Amino acid sequence: MSLRVQQANAASQAVTGYDPAEISCLSVQVLAATPQQQAFWSDPFNWQAGAQFLTEVRHRDGQLVPVEMRVRALDEATLMVSMLDRREQARHEAEFENLLGELRATLESAADGILVCDTGGHIRAFNHRFATLWGIPEALLVRRNDAAILEHLAQHLRDGPAYARQLASLAAQPLRESTDVLELKDGRVLERRAVPQLRRGRPMGRIFSFRDITAEVQTQAGLSLAARVFESSLDGIFIADEDMKVVRTNPACLRLLGGRVADGASVVSLFATDDGEAGDLTRMAQAQWQQNGFWEGDLRLRQSADAYCAVRLSWVPLRNVQGDVVQSIGFMRDLTQQRAAQQRIEQLAYSDALTGLPNRLNLTQRVDAAIEVARTSGTVFSILFIDLDRFKIINDSLGHQFGDRVLKLVAQRLSDCMRPVDILCRLGGDEFVLYLHGCSADLAASVARRILQEMERPFLLDGLGFSVQCSIGVAQYPADGLTLDELIRQADTAMYRVKERGRGNFSFYQPHMSAGLLSRMKLEHAMRQALEHDRMAVFFQPQVHIDSDRIVAAEALLRWTDPEFGVVSPGVFIPLAEESGYIVTLGAWVMEQAVQEAARWQSQGMAIKVSVNVSALEFRQSGFVERLTGLLQRYGLAPQLLELELTESILLQDAQDMALRVRQIAELGVGMVIDDFGTGYSNLAYLKKLPISKIKIDQSFVRGLPSDEGDQAIVGAIINMGQALGVEIVAEGVETAEQLAAIRRMHGHYFQGFLCAPGMPRERFDECLQAQRTGMGAVAFRQHQAQCAQLPALQPFQSM
């Protein structure tokens, strides 16, 4: 296909600058203004398949014109290209972005401290001026705590009970406006203005503005100070005579008036309203003077013939000894910034406070509008549900503040993968939703792959390099749902399937995935019934002392055989138990079975250590140490014959509490073992500070021995470190004699794996111990491997 223009309509001239006759026989590539567009026309697959996208075309005069272009193949030799002029829309979008920037600046440049609360009294937003005014500690600014901030305010007031009563009164009257004065313990005086925040005429909260009026109050002590305050006040002040004519104004008032001198003018002439309120101003003020001693209200101040600004006027009479009004003073506060800030606060309600991305409400409104258009136009779009894999490890090991900063980096990297017409939303936690406008399944897959590639690039924060992997579920409109909630739910289901299959990938939603959730519910129910019906059993896998070739310990393994599901892998039901919290019940049962068996071996003169994996949730239980002590006493097991295996991440969570618990257990005489060493966020400081007796080298490092130089270096480093710290080393997953020989050369202490035996029922393990009593070592035991190999392969009872 030549890509030469055959026909053009008259409307195309406004976009291209070519009249229809002139552009005929020219190549459509004369309009290609961007490398992306040139690449599009250079590949027949693109335009033969048809496309619709936003781009720019080159006008005849060389200018770039933003358009919405649609390319559709009419037949094998003819394409129809339609272009919708988007210049006006682009201009409006630029103006809108400028307006948003101004609103952001307005909120933070407001002279008053602004605090916004919802109808329940919970904080929605505040500006930096408010934080400075009240001396909010930095810790509360970095990690918001509404209750702590409100308590901070109450503690700084001289009359806390009166302040509480004022708040209760305002809460009982949501439409009430009020102004009051707050005295602080440090001697400052703040003026608080409270106005209802309305949406469509209904109260949705309250806006409090705070201003330090300490200087204004002190001016009442003397005329000299009053004169200085009059000249320097940020509020516009005028003084009127007994006839309500202005006799003096301060510089702030002159600025509010736009430089217009008001001396000699009536107070009424300064203001204007749509309902004639200014005309009745004198009458209303005098009535309020008699009742309250002042008048206060919002008015429009006339700055020029056709320019006004919103002000809050406080008008106070000055009386002689007879009680007659001889002068009056008006205080005017410019409300322009405050009202702009209020509008900006409403804008903030549509964005995520941490990342600045659109929030769920914003996404819902924009996607609902897109759905209305798609219903009539027949277009499609995609929803991507993005969940960060194992992000909890970052929060637990490095802190939530560090995790929040990581989320900001992730949000920026995801934003780099989207077009201006797409929408990225943070649902909360580590979950994101990406709306891809007019996106087919192929394009959605391409975007998902790009996201995965981008996330594979290392992150660097505070000198720490780390990786953040994600799992992505994709749903298509209208095939997978007709509403945003349906599409997010289906994409979430698809993402969950990715998690089940190993994480770090993407998947499109398929109807059968929902059925998989039902199977998961059935599996969880069966798991909760398994103990009661004797469907679970504890198996034991030997640990062999390398130099003596004798079995010295055994690791307890959990096996589940179900009449409906058959043999269920620990890799399936252990994560399910952890998510549901049932891991605590399972862990307690395994611990008791293991202690009971170890006590039986001890009584038969075959004392060996038994090690039990402990999950994070079980280890954090408040009565864990007491329950462990009770088991040892009940079965009479010597504490040194029991070992607890913990992962590194458990010890790094709530480090002080965990260190105390580890020491309490060590004082009992129970050994502490670090399982899967090197696979998490390692912090070697705890090895020196905590009473750790053993380190287990993860089988992922043993698997490559002896040929893999990297694995050999890692294993050697761990063994040398253990020797330096006086900690014993156990190599997991040893399956070949070559692997064992390599560990022996590096002076490892113990090994565990299929080279010796898989996990076995206690009866078969008893046979091994009996054989060892007769003088047979592990070498002799391996002669029985033909029988042991008939047992199904098991995994340790641990967090997956």
Image: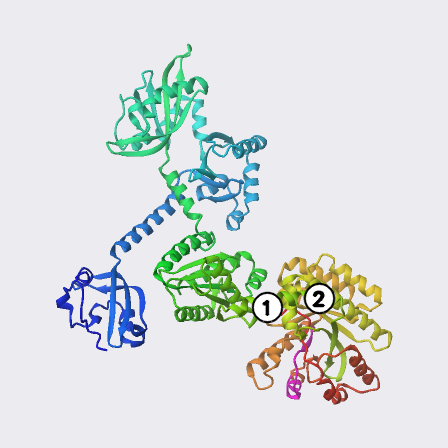
**Is residue 188 rendered magenta in the image?**
no
State how far apart marks 1 and 2 are (Cα): 17 Å
For residue 98, above or below residue 437? above
Left or right of 766 on screen, residue 187: left
Task: Specify whether residue 307 is in view.
Answer: yes
The C terminus, quarter of image:
bottom right
User: From the viewer's perspective, is residue 610 above or below residue 280?
Assistant: below
Q: Residue at x 47, y 30 (%)?
A: 178
What type is the residue that disc 1 sits on? Ser
Q: Secondary structure at mark 1?
A: loop
Q: Taking 467 as reference, is 358 above or below it?
A: above
On the question of residue 209 being in view, the answer is: no
Q: In terms of depth relative to the viewer, which is nearer, 145 or 271? A: 271
Part of the protein shown in magenta: 726-742
Q: Quadrant of the N terminus?
A: bottom left
Residue identifier under label 1: 682
Residue 732 is inside the magenta segment = yes
On the image, the x and y values in percent for residue 592 come to 78, 67
